[in-house]
Image (cartoon, helix red, strand yellow):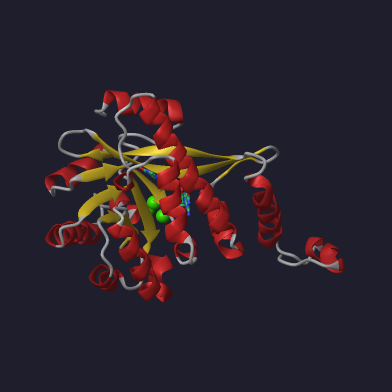
């Protein structure tokens, strides 16, 4: 549903399947969401497994539409990716995160690093480095406080360009995490070619790690691999005691998941910052 002319009505025809119909409306809503102030962020803590200390946060976007209520990012982010709206949305998230870190600093809080999910579509626009540097400057944020999470799958066709952008930003002190690791097509080749600081083991492995022996083997191997490559490694989607125990036994240093906390609002994030430890 891009450039629409006189035949707009066709889009509403009963021949259109309901998924397309819904997407069309969602996309229309998305176009106004920034101006209408409908987005906000939640923050999910990542925990140091040994000390139970708050290590950092991941910023996750939320959309509260006046009619539809909350729309899940799992639903609208893919649409935003297709329609290029992801560039604007990504910039909004990054600026919001910088603002938030500055606010926390001004409140006298000891801030922790924050990771932001970044579409490779945005990363590959020519002005991305300048955009990031300008934000860090404007909000007086140390570059080591910003980590960019990129999913494996989004890199596939652009490895060389991604590598270039990463190199420039890493020189400036920004770190990079490889998100959803293990779900992509050429995981090992990405690790070899690109210089990621952090590896996030995808939650599909973690969620069945207790019952599924193969997933146990894969998870152990990924932990071993990350350690060998000197990467920080995080298991995401940890929900149960049993999953946590497995990860502890296998020396997984960092954990993110409902077992410690769901993504939370600003007020709760501040409580975590002040408490420093999560139980
Ligand atoms: P992701 O980057 O893999 O983020 C982790 C997702 O897992 C989040 O879902 C989080 O709420 C959820 N999660 C965390 N712990 C647990 C757990 O213990 N169990 C389960 N079942 N889920 C857990 P969310 O917030 O719905 O986001 C879904 C996806 O949407 C994200 O996956 C990410 O790919 C995308 N997304 C979210 N915010 C942004 C954003 O600001 N920009 C971009 N480009 N993508 C975003
Ligand atoms: Ca992520
Ligand atoms: Ca992930
Ligand atoms: Ca994911």
Q: Could you tell me residue 76's position as x and y percent?
A: 57, 53
Q: Is residue 14 left or right of residue 255?
A: right
The image shows residue 119, relative to residue 107, as above or below, that is below
Residue 142 higher or lower than 165, as above or below: above
Question: Which quadrant would residue 71 be assigned to in this image?
Answer: top right
Of residues 114 and 173, the one drawn nearer to the viewer in this rendering: 173
Q: Name which residue lies at 36% across and 30% down.
A: 105
Residue 56, image x, y percentages? 30, 40
Let me know if residue 269 appears in the view. Answer: no
Q: Specify the quarter for ligand 4.
A: bottom left
> Image quadrant for the N terminus?
bottom right
Query: Where residue 166 sits in the image (x, y, percent)?
Result: 34, 63
The residue at 22%/33% (across/down) is 53
Residue 136, image x, y percentages: 40, 46
Q: Nearer the viewer, residue 34 or 82?
A: 34
Please state the total of marks drawn on the protein image.
0
At x 28%, y 59%, the residue is 171
Give the residue drawn at x 70%, y 58%: 24
Q: Quadrant of the C terminus?
A: top left
Question: Is residue 7 positioned above or below 198 on the image?
Answer: below
Q: Is residue 139 left or right of residue 203?
A: right
Q: Is residue 172 left or right of residue 14?
A: left
Q: Is residue 181 visible?
A: yes
């Amino acid at each position: 549903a891009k450039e629409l002319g006189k035949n707009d009505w066709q889009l509403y025809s009963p021949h259109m399947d309901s998924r397309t119909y819904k997407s069309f409306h969602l996309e229309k809503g998305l176009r106004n969401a920034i101006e209408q102030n409908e987005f906000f962020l939640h923050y999910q803590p990542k925990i140091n497994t040994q000390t139970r200390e708050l290590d950092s946060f991941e910023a996750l976007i939320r959309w509260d539409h006046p009619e539809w209520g909350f729309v899940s990012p799992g639903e609208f982010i893919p649409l935003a990716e297709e329609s290029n709206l992801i560039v604007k949305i990504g910039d909004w998230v990054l600026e919001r995160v910088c603002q938030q870190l500055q606010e926390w600093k001004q409140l006298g809080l000891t801030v922790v690093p924050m990771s932001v999910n970044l579409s490779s579509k945005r990363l590959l626009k020519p002005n991305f480095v300048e955009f990031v540097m300008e934000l860090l400057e404007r909000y007086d944020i140390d570059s080591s406080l910003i980590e960019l999470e990129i999913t494996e799958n989004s890199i596939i066709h652009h490895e060389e360009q991604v590598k270039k952008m990463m190199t420039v930003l890493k020189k400036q002190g920004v770190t990079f995490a490889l998100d959803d690791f293990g779900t992509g097509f050429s995981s090992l080749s990405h690790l070899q070619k690109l210089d990621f600081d952090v590896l996030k083991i995808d939650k599909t492995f973690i969620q069945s790690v207790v019952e599924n022996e193969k997933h146990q083997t894969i998870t152990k191997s990924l932990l071993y691999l990350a350690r060998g490559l000197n990467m920080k490694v995080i298991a995401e989607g940890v929900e149960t005691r049993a999953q946590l125990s497995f990860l502890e036994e296998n020396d997984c240093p960092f954990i993110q998941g409902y077992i410690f906390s769901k993504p939370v609002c600003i007020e709760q994030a501040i409580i975590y910052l002040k408490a420093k430890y999560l139980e």
